Image (cartoon, coloured by chain):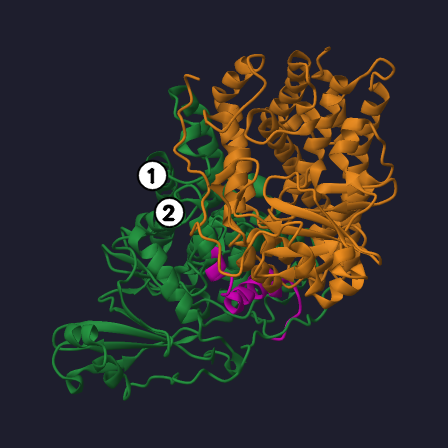
Chain colours: A orange, B green
Amino acid sequence: MSTATTSTATTPTLPSDRPPPGYRPLTEASLPDYLASLDEIRARLGGRPADWQVREVGDGNLNLVFLVDGPAGAVCVKQSLPYVRSFGEAWRMPLERAFFENSYYSIVGPHVPGLAPAVYHYSPELYCITMEKLAPHIILRRGLIAGTRFPKVARQVGDYVARASFFTSDLARPFERKLDGMALFARNQSLLRITVELVFADPYRVMERNRWTSPALDGIAAQFRADGPLKAAAARMGQRFLGEAQALVHGDLHSGSVMVTEGDSRVIDPEFAFYGPIGFDLGAFIGNLLLAWYAQPGHASEGDDRAGYRAWILEQIGIFWESFRATFLALWRSEAAGDVYPASLFAAPGDAPALEAAREAFVASLFADMVGFAACKMIRRIFGFAHVADFETIADKTRRAACETGALMLARTMLLHPEQFTRIDDICDAAARFARDI
Amino acid sequence: MSTATTSTATTPTLPSDRPPPGYRPLTEASLPDYLASLDEIRARLGGRPADWQVREVGDGNLNLVFLVDGPAGAVCVKQSLPYVRSFGEAWRMPLERAFFENSYYSIVGPHVPGLAPAVYHYSPELYCITMEKLAPHIILRRGLIAGTRFPKVARQVGDYVARASFFTSDLARPFERKLDGMALFARNQSLLRITVELVFADPYRVMERNRWTSPALDGIAAQFRADGPLKAAAARMGQRFLGEAQALVHGDLHSGSVMVTEGDSRVIDPEFAFYGPIGFDLGAFIGNLLLAWYAQPGHASEGDDRAGYRAWILEQIGIFWESFRATFLALWRSEAAGDVYPASLFAAPGDAPALEAAREAFVASLFADMVGFAACKMIRRIFGFAHVADFETIADKTRRAACETGALMLARTMLLHPEQFTRIDDICDAAARFARDI
């Protein structure tokens, strides 16, 4: 720890610690009355409020989540809490993140039909979204831990990122619309601060809120904190995170933000949304697939060494990227109506090769961002504040540390030697090189 | 013209064509009463309003500019007009640009002491800024046309860009402050649209508002409109213009936005300000120095072939860049208090080489942006709507076209072969290669 200082960075706080008048946390008992006051929701659930079954199921960090079943239908209700649930009431959080989540759905929803939950109602007083209950969906991360194959998810999430980012970029729309959105999401500062500190700084410095599998990883943690080039590479990605206003990005697109069935995938929880680099969403998703891949031996059982499932995961990384790439390029070729690379500049047949080369170059830059952001996301889930169930559910700490070590070594190489990663197969091929026997 | 289509891009318009109540264009006759109502200004001017001498001197496109002299002091008054002055009342412009100019001065002013005019008062009703009268300053562009040497200007403007951009970047301040500023300047859309269309699109497509020295340049204009790789390179710079939120940039930092004396330089007219790429300001300045260089033979006289002055201009390009570079790096080394490359990550002596390498890499990326933006700015001043006096004052069209052709050939090479330009001397050396005898 000799080369790192304890940061003076502060825990994010509310401008005011007092929630606004009208706000109250909902409970299983109080929710039916609230929903009954919303005509559309009451009709959707059917019957009388007393007939509705309400369950609080929130397992995330920041919110109350209720599932409500009525005789005619069901809804999901998500409400902001004024503190970080997993940390306690001392870490205050602005309620407004529900506003940003709702704003994200309003803007992106129309462009990703069938790939996000339908939003039925938003209450600005209660900071509460009432939306489609996804059933029988499960969180993708749980499926990855269980070893369940979802044949459509990689392609569908790849399409999702392509559509959400293309249609909110300057390629698709007059730049004024992006600026309007930027003005709005520029206020989502508390959640951005979490990312800025927890992803791009904390894992590389001594911070009380950090934790890792100790003592096994103490040595690597210290190495990372002392690795100037590694820290500079992570800081460079942090600079790109804050500086590249390419599109409205989800901001937290890991495998816990995707709900799946065999045929259906939905992206949820966009409260970290802002105008940023498209590669941040791409990197979050493949970074978490890579974590899942490294965790597999920890979930092996007598009859299943998970080798086949592991191969399936790597395949999904390829499918995800190729799906994103193909959809993004196809949209650019057919739906470009923005101010960047304006159609009026490339109207002649002779212009096509140069424009196509520009498209390929831009997508290559997104790939490079994806590599860097994936690495940062992997490292922060092992050395930072918030960990992932993929590793946390490996009870044997020695086995867990071995899995985590592989992920750390790959991530370090992705940050320090980006030139080794120019095709998606480079990433998949490298994964095995850094895997540890356990 | 076969490969270009007439764009459907619209002339920027006000949301409403009617100025808000309370707004009235000031006149030489009405100005004293207005100024007399401002205690501080009345005191500054001294005497009675009837004693004040008022002259309207605006020669730009968008504003009324009055110089007011009183017995005790002087002020300059700049008021927005609701249309583009040089185009006529049909091209409506939002008055709010005075608000953005004033906002820019508020944020940047404290960081550039002695390099911008002091602002005394802003009227949100009249969209009117009352500020320091700069005397005996002249517009740098006029000095460049006259062949006058200003020994300090290159160093001072380089310092200005370094200080203004560093202190408004994520390197210097918590990112929340940049986001607050981005939310504000995201509303400066009408002026951004001018840049987006006039700089990055119009010169490469058929547009009614374009003009050039015809027929001499008709052939090159058609070549540019048919050059797919050139258009893609310009479009890429347009994408960076809209996507790189690095710092609060001036947005129009040509040689007409700098007022000079032998020892003093002031940057004026920041109404195009927004959070964008630092290289846009750098490129505007050296692009216009290069235009001045190419224009020199057009201003030669019997006794002065301008060869010596030309050499002086190239020297200033080098001094400007080196001054920017040295100041920006020095500030980063001593004043970094932001979230990007946070000091807490690089506290150990062993971290210094990696951080220094990151600094050099970032400055190299600014250099590359400068090259690309300079080229776009040069081309648009020859083929677009708004031209520069450097060329316009060359009465002989054949001579003017020869000067302009050299500038166009250099700019094309800068866009198509950026790899040839990695040091400032590469630009200076190349200038002569493309000069035409006239």
- Residue at the (72%, 22%) spot, across then down: A295
Classify residue A100 by image quadrant: bottom right
Per the picture, the main secondary structure of the magenta-coloured stretch is: helix
Q: Which residue is mark 2?
A: B167
Q: Are marks 1 and 2 in contact (CB under 8 Å)?
A: yes
Residue type at mark 1?
A: Glu
- Residue at the (42%, 44%) spot, across then down: B174
Q: Are marks 1 and 2 on the same chain?
A: yes
Label 1 to label 2, Cα distance in Å? Answer: 9 Å
Q: Which residue is mark 1?
A: B335
Residue type at mark 2?
A: Phe
The residues colored magenta run B182-208
Q: Is residue A221 left or right of residue B40?
A: right
Image location (x, y in percent) of residue A428 = 76, 26
Nearest the camera: A264 or A220?
A264
Label 2 resides on the chain identified as B
Label 1 resides on the chain identified as B
- Residue at the (38%, 41%) spot, across then down: B328
Circle 1 SS class: helix
Q: How many marks?
A: 2
Q: Is residue B44 left or right of residue A176?
A: left
Nearest the camera: A27 or A134?
A27
Q: Is residue A109 above or below residue A148?
A: below
Image location (x, y in percent) of residue B172 = 39, 43
Crowding at dot 1, Cα within 10 Å, few <14 / some 14-19 / many 20+, comes out as: some
Mark 1 or mark 2: whose residue is earlier in sequence: 2
Residue B70 appearing in the image: yes
Image location (x, y in percent) of residue B246 = 48, 48
Classify residue A404 by image quadrant: top right
Q: Is residue A423 above or below residue B2?
A: above
Image location (x, y in percent) of residue A407 = 66, 22
- Residue at the (34%, 60%) spot, across then down: B106
